[in-house]
Image: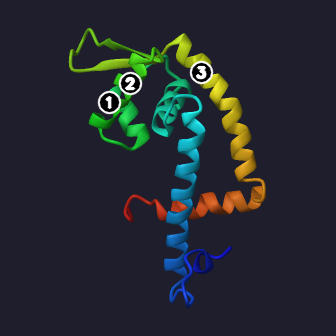
Amino acid sequence: MSLQHELKLPQPFQSSKHEALLNLLRTASVLSKKGDRFFSEYGLTMSQFNLLMVLKYSGSACLTQSEIAERLLVNRANVTGLIDRLQKAGLVERTGDRKDRRHYFIMLTPKGGKILDKVEMSYDKEVDLIMEGVSVEEALRIIKAMEKIRKPDKC
């Protein structure tokens, strides 16, 4: 369904670029709500899942809070709260840096790894369902378009 019809607009958009941008925002909102429902079944938020994924796929046993914030594109204060909740749930560990007491290293616990493995299997199936109508070629075009929009000098 077109965005014009979805929003019950009486006339078409004047600019296809504006319509494309609004489609991106609308799609992001729909996917975010769907993600919230999906991750709540596992007692996680989308942000917590993303943090666990960053730790799992970082190529390192642990990361600093600053490194995690940089990879998640959020500020360090937001990461601190996420880590606090994940640590309380026993999914991550926080250890101090012996060389610099201002830094903490964050690592996935065995419990965190197990829950992440469980969530990932379902997540992969959910992604396949959401994207089933999109061909590989279309997905690659979407990726390229999003990369163009996210160029550092534009955002």
What residue sits 61% from the left and 17% below the top?
114
SS assignment at label 3: helix
Q: Position of residue 38 (x, y in %)?
A: 60, 40
7 sits left or right of 93 in the view: right
Q: Which residue is mark 2?
A: 85
Q: Which residue is mark 3?
A: 115
- Check disc 2: other Cα within 10 Å, few if <14, some if 14-19, many if 20+: some
Whole-angstrom CA distance, mark 3 to mark 1, is 20 Å
- Check disc 3: other Cα within 10 Å, few if <14, some if 14-19, many if 20+: some
What residue sits 65% from the left and 76% below the top?
2
Whole-angstrom CA distance, mark 2 to mark 1, is 6 Å
CB under 8 Å between callouts 2 and 1? yes
Residue type (three-letter) at the residue carrying disc 1: Gly
Q: Give the vertical position of 63 relative to 95 (above or below).
A: below
User: As rendered, which of 50 and 151 lies closer to the eye?
Assistant: 50
What residue sits 35% from the left and 42% below the top?
74
